[in-house]
Image (spheres, grey):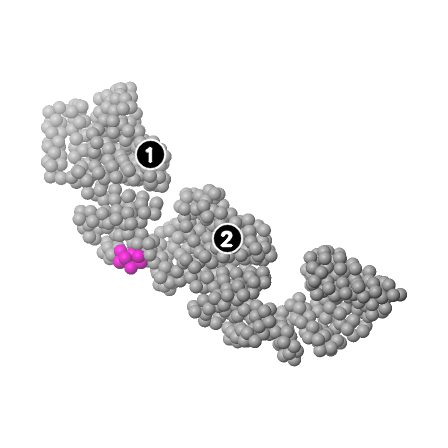
């Protein structure tokens, strides 16, 4: 600086002497003004240097004709552009750089260094304007010329490599950026007074490595930068805080939360020293600290951080600034985690209102994320229509940002698939979730948690569609992934329960019990006996009942009953379902008094919850009718079945096969009570309905068999034989072998009828 000040004084003295010696403005006067401007620029006096360059340019334009291309004029215009760039007047700077570049190209040619210098600075302007591709074109050409004219390791080459690399990082072309940065760094290391440039290179290397996930190299680069900045600028400079912020973020991303918090604490100290409390930088820091608090499950502290960040941004930014939307999204996520979905929906909608029509990729990505979160909360309150609209908007935005073949797009498509599954659109749901799984299997991003969740959801859908052989391997793969994750007992329990249910459906009862009991043990180890544990006990009790392990069934179902009563109340539907299963066990043990007690208790709870005309009431009445039939109380059994038939006929989506089965049951009781006419009427009605539907040949066979039995009771063996033979063909159509007890019974009846008719 001392040298520049001396030079400036000399040039100013020279200018005074020139003006004394001659009133005319000459080229030498113009050059003196230009040199004064250069000195002022080196001293950081950019307003002053701009004035000096203007004086120089004014004289040069008087001296040189307008049609004459002057390199001297171009030189001053170029320097004016540099000064304006320093003052932040980017558009004005370009207005001087462009004519200077054109003159240099025409006079000196496209391979001259001065033309390269102009290209470099035009590229810098484009960089500031966000015209990344145009900037790269200029800087690539400038770099080519410089490398052909200058020695290896020249600072000017490094300067262009430096700016060019930062542009490639913006485009996330890290493979091109890193060699440029390393080359520039090698040059700067050998030069004096380049410490800040080296520090900036390390910052860019840190950013580049973080983008491609080489986190340790990124942290090391930022540490080198921090060491330089502290040495040159001091410990309390904001530039040091900026680097510490990046180090903290990276530490947090690797799970090193203590080191992250140490870095953020130092950032807070510097911000407080430099800015005070009410500054936007503090809001940025609060967001980062909030993210860490979320990771350690301290949601209350995270919420305090986010709300304070929101307050600062609302205080210091314009009403619709996108950073306010970002803070709102974080606050909304905490409400969502707390299951405060109406609050989260309101906040997410406010954030989306700020984004409105996002016009750059960053804002489109953030808006897409918030739309997705909004859809999730809307699904939680069963607002399915609006949830679909939110997911669809998120999907469109992600398609614009990432493309339709991206994981990000598939992620929202998966959400839509889950939503479709909730409303019964299973085929569409399967297609979307399968697409997501396919993307995850071929992805470099091994997010095993998302993959296991998708496999689990697809397994559930396949199971609901009765494709249990397809469901089982999906759930087993989900289980394998979850077993490899830490602190995942509840998620493992969830999958084991579903696998246990599938094994039960496949009649692999021992395997079912192994899965269900492990599921229960894992859940109890984390949350104790809650409602879901009760569901698992209920399922275990059902399997024991099927295996005729009645004592174990009663023990498990009684425990389930106690669990439900203590967690969801004595009049909950789960209590009714458990009582019903206890009734089945007592029925199987021929303890009809206890069976009736349990079934009636369950029926009363169903009526409290569902009213008197729900189809579940009809099913419960069927169970009670079965008990009455076994104790020969046929009138009471018929009353129950008549009531269940009435209820089923009231249903809008009436199931014809259930009505056919109901009528068949009534026929059995009429026959047992020797009312053959009524029995025949019920059997024929049941047969007529089941034949119309055509989906249950077994029920048709049973009805035909019983019709044959009524004819036989009336000694009409010819009609009895005809119905039994038709019944036999229906049993075989249903896939029953001749050694099945129902088929064997019909075969015996056929033989008996043929013998009777042969004798007669």
Q: Residue at x 70, y 69 (%)?
A: 644
Q: Residue at x 41, y 44 (%)?
A: 361
Secondary structure mostly taken by the magenta-highlighted segment of the chain: helix
Horizontal relation, residue 327 to residue 577: left or right: left
Residue position for label 2: 415
Residue 656 seen by the camera: no
Q: Position of residue 550 (x, y in %)?
A: 58, 74
Span highlighted in magenta in the image: 256-263
Q: Nearer the viewer, mark 1 or mark 2?
A: 2
Question: The N terminus lies in which quarter of the figure?
Answer: top left
Q: Residue at x 47, y 43 (%)?
A: 405
Horizontal relation, residue 372 to residue 696: left or right: left
- Structural crowding at the residue carrying mark 1, measured as other residues with C-alpha within 10 Å and reported as few (<14), some (14–19) or many (≥20): many
Does 718 appear above or below 318?
below
Q: Which mark is residue 135?
A: 1
Q: Residue at x 72, y 66 (%)?
A: 662
* Dot 1: element: helix
Nearest to N terminus: mark 1 or mark 2 = 1
């Amino acid at each position: 600086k001392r040298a520049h000040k001396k030079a400036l004084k000399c040039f100013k003295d020279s200018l005074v002497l020139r003006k004394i010696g001659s009133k005319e403005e000459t080229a030498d006067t113009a050059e003196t003004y230009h040199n004064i401007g250069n000195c002022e620029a080196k001293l950081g006096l950019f307003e002053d240097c701009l004035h000096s360059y203007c004086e120089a340019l004014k004289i040069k334009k008087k001296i040189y004709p307008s049609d004459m291309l002057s390199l001297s004029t171009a030189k001053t215009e170029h320097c004016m552009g540099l000064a304006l760039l320093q003052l932040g007047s980017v558009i004005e700077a370009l207005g001087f750089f462009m004519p200077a570049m054109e003159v240099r190209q025409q006079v000196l040619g496209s391979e001259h260094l001065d033309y390269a210098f102009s290209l470099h600075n035009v590229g810098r302007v484009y960089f500031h304007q966000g015209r990344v591709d145009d900037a790269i074109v200029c800087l690539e050409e400038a770099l080519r010329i410089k490398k052909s004219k200058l020695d290896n390791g020249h600072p000017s080459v490094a300067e262009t490599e430096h700016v060019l690399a930062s542009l490639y990082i913006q485009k996330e072309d890290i493979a091109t950026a890193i060699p440029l940065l390393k080359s520039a760094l090698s040059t700067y290391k050998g030069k004096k007074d380049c410490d800040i440039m080296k520090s900036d290179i390390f910052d860019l290397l840190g950013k580049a490595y973080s983008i491609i996930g080489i986190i340790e190299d990124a942290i090391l680069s930022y540490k080198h930068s921090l060491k330089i900045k502290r040495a040159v600028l001091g410990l309390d400079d904001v530039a040091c805080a900026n680097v510490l912020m990046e180090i903290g973020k990276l530490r947090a991303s690797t799970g090193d939360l203590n080191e992250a918090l140490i870095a953020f604490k130092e950032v807070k100290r510097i911000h407080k020293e430099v800015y005070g409390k009410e500054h936007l930088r503090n809001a940025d820091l609060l967001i980062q600290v909030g993210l860490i608090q979320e990771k350690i499950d301290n949601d209350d502290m995270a919420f305090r951080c986010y709300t304070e960040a929101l307050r600062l941004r609302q205080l210091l930014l314009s009403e619709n600034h996108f950073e306010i939307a970002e803070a709102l999204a974080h606050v909304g996520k905490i409400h969502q985690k707390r299951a405060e979905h109406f609050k989260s929906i309101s906040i997410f909608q406010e954030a989306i209102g700020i984004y409105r029509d996002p016009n750059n990729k960053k804002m489109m990505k953030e808006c897409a994320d918030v739309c997705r979160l909004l859809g999730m909360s809307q699904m939680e309150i069963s607002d399915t229509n609006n949830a679909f609209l939110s997911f669809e908007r998120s999907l469109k935005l992600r398609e614009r940002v990432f493309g339709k073949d991206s994981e990000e797009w598939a992620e929202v498509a998966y959400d839509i698939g889950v939503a479709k599954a909730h409303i019964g659109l299973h085929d569409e749901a399967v297609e979307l979730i399968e697409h997501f799984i396919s993307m995850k299997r071929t992805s470099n991003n091994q997010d095993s948690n998302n993959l296991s969740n998708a496999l689990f959801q697809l397994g559930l859908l396949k199971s609901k569609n009765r494709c249990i052989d397809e469901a089982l391997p999906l759930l087993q793969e989900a289980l394998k992934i979850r077993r490899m994750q830490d602190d995942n007992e509840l998620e493992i329990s969830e999958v084991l329960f579903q696998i246990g249910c599938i094994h039960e459906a496949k009649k692999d009862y021992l395997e079912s019990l192994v899965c269900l009991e492990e599921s229960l043990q894992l859940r109890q180890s984390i949350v104790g006996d809650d409602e879901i544990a009760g569901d698992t006990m209920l399922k275990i009790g059902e399997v024991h009942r099927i295996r005729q392990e009645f004592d174990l069934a009663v023990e498990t179902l009684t425990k389930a009953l106690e669990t439900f009563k203590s967690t969801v109340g004595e009049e909950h539907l789960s209590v009714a379902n458990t009582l019903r299963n206890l009734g089945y066990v007592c029925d199987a043990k021929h303890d009809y008094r206890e069976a009736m007690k349990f079934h009636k208790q369950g029926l009363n709870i169903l009526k409290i919850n569902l009213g008197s005309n729900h189809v579940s009431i009809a099913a419960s009445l069927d169970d009670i009718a079965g008990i009455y039939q076994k104790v020969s109380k046929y009138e009471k059994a018929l009353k129950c079945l008549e009531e269940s038939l009435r209820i089923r006929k009231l249903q809008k989506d009436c199931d014809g096969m259930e009505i056919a089965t109901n009528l068949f049951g009534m026929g059995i009781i009429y026959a047992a009570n020797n009312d053959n006419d009524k029995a025949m009427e019920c059997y024929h009605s049941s047969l007529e309905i089941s034949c119309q539907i055509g989906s249950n040949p077994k029920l048709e066979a049973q009805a035909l068999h019983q019709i044959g039995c009524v004819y036989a009771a009336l000694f009409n063996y010819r009609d009895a034989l005809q119905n039994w033979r038709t019944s036999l063909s229906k049993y075989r159509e249903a896939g029953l072998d001749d050694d099945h007890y129902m088929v064997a019974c019909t075969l015996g009846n056929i033989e008996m009828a043929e013998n009777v008719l042969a004798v007669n």
